[in-house]
Image (tube, helix red, strand yellow):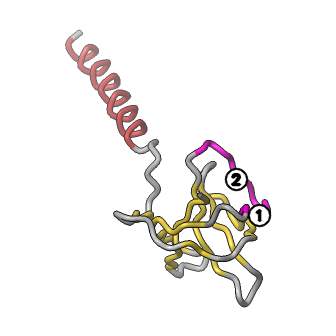
Amino acid sequence: MKFFLGFVTGIIVTFIVLFLYTYKNSGDELDGLTLFKQTGECIAKRKLKIFQTVRTNAALAEFGVYPNEMMVLLINHEGIAYYDNQKIIIPKNQCARRIGTYTYSTRIGFQKTVPAVVIE
């Protein structure tokens, strides 16, 4: 009987630990994202295209076309979902403001660092 109670207790504790670990890692934090203490400058370009979504509200996007494109991590805090190949035009009264940097690994293993921006 003691063995059975210990076994059941072990299973329950395991599920509690897994739940707490999942809950802790499900926040808005994004691995590789470093935020500035103060917001940075505006990027003057107006058109961007979502290259790859990282999360529902964060995506790698590019201003311009190859070879003169500029890759950024576009983040929004208004609950707008991004999708691959989405085209976004920034209104004239707003800009893409740098708020930090984002470091990620490409498919072939290169490490890249790009500006993290929000449209405001």
Quarter of the image where the C terminus is located: bottom right
Residue 118 as seen in the image, left or right of residue 15? right
Residue 49 occupies which quadrant of the picture?
Answer: bottom right
Farthest-out residue, top: 1
Identify which amino acid the numbered label 1 is placed on: Ile
Which is nearer the eye, 1 or 68? 68
Farthest-out residue, front: 93
Q: In the rendered image, which residue does mark 2 sit on? A: 82
Front disc: 1 or 2: 1
At horizontal 60% and vertical 44% (from top left) the residue drawn is 78
At horizontal 53% and vertical 75% (from top left) the residue drawn is 114
Which is nearer the eye, 118 or 44? 44
At horizontal 74% and vertical 54% (from top left) the residue drawn is 83
Q: Secondary structure at mark 1?
A: strand
**Location of residue 43 with respect to 27 vertically, above or below:** below
Identify which amino acid the numbered label 2 is placed on: Tyr
Residue 24 occupies which quadrant of the picture?
Answer: top left
Main secondary structure along the magenta-highlighted residues: loop
